[in-house]
Amino acid sequence: MEIGSSAAIQPPGARESTLHPLTALVPRATWATVQAVFWKDWRSEWRTRAALNSIALFSIASPVALSFSVARQRLEPETLAGLLWTVLLFAALVGLARSFVKEEESGTATLLRLSCPPDAVLWGKALFNLVLLVGTQAAAVPIFVLLLNAQLSRAGLLLLVLLLGDVGLAVVSSLLGAIASQARARGSLFAAIAVPLVLPLLVAASTGTAAAFGAVGPQGDFWPALQIMLGYDVAVVTAAWMLFDFVWSA
Amino acid sequence: MVFPFVVGIWVTAGILIGFAVPPIHDGNLILRTRQIAFFHVPMAIAMEVAFLMAAWYGISWLRTRQPRYDALSLAYAEVGTVFCVIATITGAIFARTNWGAYWSWDPQQVGIVTTLLTYAALFALRGAVEDEDKKRNLWAVYAIIGLIVAIFSTMVYRRLLPDNATLHPSNTVITSDALNKFALWFNVIGYIMLLVWMAKLRSRFEMASQRLREVQWA
Amino acid sequence: MLCVRKLAKRYGARVVFRDVNFEVEVGTVAAVLGSNGAGKSTLLKIVAGLTRPTSGRVQWLPTGDAQGALDAEVLQWQCGLAAPDAPVYRELTVGENLEFFGRVRGVELTPDAVLSHLEKFSLHTRRNDLAMDLSSGLRARLQLAVATLHRAPLLLLDEPSANLDEAGRAILQRVVEAQREQGLALIATNDPRDLELCDERIEL
């Protein structure tokens, strides 16, 4: 919401000196406000570790569980890639709605709406979700590769695919987290509305990851997958930017 | 009030034409139950149109905040869901008779399942929000982003799934002779008109029930 | 001047209020009165732009020569709100809460500024305590501190004295007096002692 500073109310009769400098300011989404939201979320997450624990546990425990059942088999790169992204997706679904759901459940959303520019809320929380994803994957992906004996033939490609996938997941889950947190049955609704929208990303990410795990032939061609992931990221960033205000504000 | 009759006659004629056209060749094969194609393909196209309209009226609602646009968006999504289910079922039957499998995870089928899931999520969302305006806002936002992602999915599945995975012909009916082509487009127009008519009725019903609630309030 | 015209709110079939009209001049403190469920809190939320009214409008009309009325969505940024259902962040300390709400409004508060603001609410000794460790009375003071942080021309207080002790009530009184100098205040209350702070009454 763009509001000119001229819109500030000057109480008639009040002398300039009695006015606090803030009255003349209308909050706008700047890098500083985005950071403020990010650090606020980071601090309270670090003190409670609600989302971090659930994402980390899920994304580390499921490769372990998988390795028990398929330990003696030699899995194709495509299968491994599909398994990895299924694990990462469900780990994300467990924890990423948390930051918005917590605002609504504890009632702090009210003051946040009143004082914070909507775009700062969106990007601050998207950044927080991105850091959460990257942080947990830094632990979970090596464990997955080790336990399931994946041949990491293109490590750089895997990092790129993970990063592109995480950006898309973080932005989509912020927008959809804001939607789900305002409805009943917040947690389960989030999974239901998120899955259809991240399916294309999941398919593209699996294809790219299969190439990173050494798939050959048509499956080894990773450029279309990377292009599609980049396009998806740009599309959801734009859509979230344009639509978030309608989700967040009254 | 002429429109419903036109639609009724048009669609009936479309079905009859489906029986009158010559057989369709897919390679060396002669397609069986080809009449389904004149039902299934237009249904799928109309379903996509419905999705587009639901998102379009979602944008209209967000811009103007006129409840009738929200009612139209809801109506197109509901009728679109019905069309989507019918297209899925008829497609599966057609695939079974001609290629031996109901389901083969080809691009079109993956796409239609994603669309069905998106519709299901839309209705789940609408049922879970209490505040009327909030409900409409969230619905519209999800319909818009759902459409964007659906466009992406089609692109994704076309380019990423291996070519040999698909049994679905993309041009058999269209490139066969002129009569088949005519029958197909005749039906496409028919089912889009059917969609528009049903959605209009549904949105009028929605507006009426809203007005009823307001009368109770006043 | 705050101007409310033909305001109505309903949730589904449940009517909260209908046809609410009032005006409040700058320099005035108005009490919003009404039985439980009359919609006092809802009215404050609508003025703050946090809830959309079913019909009617809230406007800020300039007095004198100033130009142009302000609608609710602009007004939102000129409001300070302290309400029982608008808590601060429990996992942040008292000081971090103030810093955060300053920062999202675009102002970097120095440690001294935070401290001097907290002193007005006798919270400066609890500066590094988590908000969840405060008693409910002290948390109510912290909410007041956040609401007045940016010297809002429009101060909205919902049941402000509910958990306050004598010292807290004295702080509230000073807040309300200071608000007369810089704008106006609406106080939703059922407490007769709060009425002493107010110049006008708005009955719902």
Image: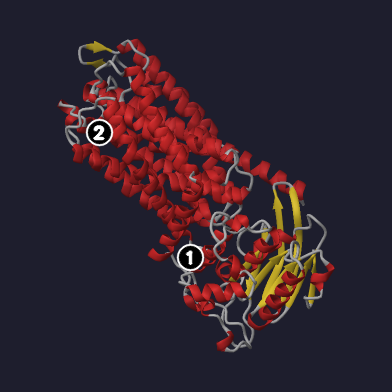
**Lateral position of residue A225 relative to residue B2, left or right:** left
Quarter of the image where one finds residue A148? top left
Look at the image and tell me in which quarter the N terminus of chain C lies: bottom right
Residue B102 in picture, x, y percent from top left: 37, 14
Who's the residue at 72% across and 48% down the image? B214
Amino acid bearing label 2: Thr
Q: Quadrant of the C terminus of chain C?
A: bottom right
Residue A164 seen by the camera: yes
**Tags 1 and 2 on a common chain:** no
Foreground residue, B189 or A80? A80
Horizontal placement of B119 versus C126: left or right? left
Label 1: state its secondary structure.
Answer: loop
Report the residue marked by disc 2: A209
Marker disc for residue B179: none
Above or below residue B159? Residue C33 is below
Chain of the residue under the numbered disc 2 shown in the image: A
Q: Amino acid at mark 1?
A: Val
Q: Residues within 10 Å of mark 1 (few under 14, many from 20)?
A: many
- Percent position of residue A220, x then y: 17, 30
Q: Residues within 10 Å of mark 2 (few under 14, many from 20)?
A: many
Question: Quick check: marks 1 and 2 in contact, CB under 8 Å?
Answer: no
Residue found farthest to the right: C192
Q: Which mark is residue C104?
A: 1
SS label for mark 2: helix
Residue B105: % across, % down: 33, 22
Residue at 19% over, 27% down: A215
Q: Nearer the viewer, residue B212 or C204?
A: C204
